Image (tube, rainbow, N blue to C red):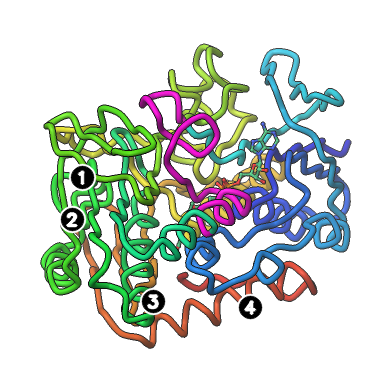
Amino acid sequence: MGKRIVILGSSFGGLNTALHLRKLLGNGHSITVVSADPQFTFIPSLPWVVAGRREPSAIQCPVAPRLKRNGVEYVQDAITAVDPERQEAVGKNGVYPYDYLVAATGSELDFGAVSGLGPIKGHSQSIFNVEQALQARAALEKLLRAGSGTIVLGNAQGASCLGPVYEMALLIDALLRKRKARHKFKMALFTNEPHLGHFGVGGFGAMTRMLEDEFADREIECHLNSKISGITPDHVELENGVRFGNGFSLIVPAFFGSHAYMGIEGLANPRGFVLADDHLANPKYPNIYAVGVSLAIAPPAPTPVPVGVPKTGQMTDDMAKKAAYNISADIQNRPKIMGKDFSVTCIADGGNTAFFIGAAPLLPPRDWLIHKKSILFHYLKEGLEKYYMASVRYGLPLPTFPF
Ligand SMILES: Cc1cc2nc3c(=O)[nH]c(=O)nc-3n(C[C@H](O)[C@H](O)[C@H](O)COP(=O)(O)OP(=O)(O)OC[C@H]3O[C@@H](n4cnc5c(N)ncnc54)[C@H](O)[C@@H]3O)c2cc1C
């Protein structure tokens, strides 16, 4: 009898899992994607939206047609709870019974952890969806029109998605230099990391020195091991007493996984990230898999201020393929493969240059590590964005490149 596979989320994790599963399983099983957002967004391009280099239409398209073309059903709904005993995911509009469940719901943003944090109830900008990016773009343009002020980019205590703040600092610096206005704005970056380029994994060799040089040359003041004590309309204040003017601030919060998984003994950690074994299956409920940001990964070593482990888009695509393989292997009685042997490839754009990082495995010591700075990586990132969007829009094979 055919199995019912329900995938929660339709971004990098959910989309890739669904398409790979359909390829591996053929047509005898039902695959349903349930997701809150009917649009696929190429999230790595959101910093370009803030900097005015992209319009949302270039990096968004409906996801359902791509899924439908590959025999995957799409339902728009927000999941509020999962009942692993009854094998049901519960949404606002319906209940989704499953034989296999894949958690690919990314993160929820913990703006409540810091007073004044976030664009809704607080006084800082954010960058996790198109609406936030457009709001940040408007706030930045407002400051630039004002002609002078302080621009603050920061990673809050517990943050794990650390790259966008580096990218935003470099992109804004490049924008200001292009307008010959850099001398009118003070720029500061603070991060929860113990050194620049730690990225929650202990760093990437001498890349730290490369970033230190880059930020020194661009005269962007950097603060490490930072904890925010509060944000007001006028100031961003750190716990060590350092205070910045709040002309424009974009601050990345810590994540929750999902409240839908929280509090289910054995399924998720206290912050709602799904626990998984080496095959990406939950140890207590082995028919539940986790991919991408939903997956719980413990920090490799403690840091003075908590820093989470990042899960990049490329890591997410890789996990999706492995989870799909392991679900198909389970159904077809084949041996499963290792799902947690992470490596990473990433391009951080800097506006007028870019940085490539490649490392295997993800955590040091490694067999392979490369970091290079070149404008060529900027063009590579643009090309990957265009190809990725074309593949979602027109059904081309999804790429397996770094981006
Ligand atoms: C600004 C920025 C820049 C980045 N740049 C890069 C980069 O250059 N390179 C790189 O490799 N990675 C980058 N990343 C990381 C990359 O975007 C993530 O790794 C990737 O988006 C993770 O995919 P995901 O599917 O796990 O989760 P997400 O992309 O967060 O998607 C979650 C999905 O689940 C859905 N969902 C959420 N909650 C629910 C619910 N309750 N019910 C139903 N559906 C739900 C959402 O609608 C969405 O479809 C960047 C991230 C950001 C924020």
Q: Which residue is under mark 4?
A: 387
Task: Name which of mark 4 and mark 1 comes first in the sequence.
Answer: 1
Q: Residues within 10 Å of mark 2 (few under 14, many from 20)?
A: many
Residue 193 got which mark? 1
Highlighted range, magenta: 110-137
Give the image location of residue 298, x and y in percent: 32, 34
Residue found 53% across the figure and 48% down from its top: 128
Dot 3 falls on a residue whose secondary structure is loop
Task: Name which of mark 4 and mark 2 comes first in the sequence.
Answer: 2
Residue found 31% across the figure and 55% down from its top: 151
Q: Is residue 4 left or right of residue 254?
A: right
| Amino acid on which disc 1 is placed | Glu
Circles 1, 2 touching at the beta carbon (< 8 Å): yes
Dot 2 falls on a residue whose secondary structure is loop
Task: Decide if ligand 1 comes within 8 Å of the CB at mark 2.
Answer: no
Task: Decide if ligand 1 comes within 8 Å of the CB at mark 1.
Answer: no
Q: Which residue is under mark 3?
A: 351
Q: Which residue is under mark 2?
A: 196
Circles 1, 3 touching at the beta carbon (< 8 Å): no
| Amino acid on which disc 2 is placed | Leu
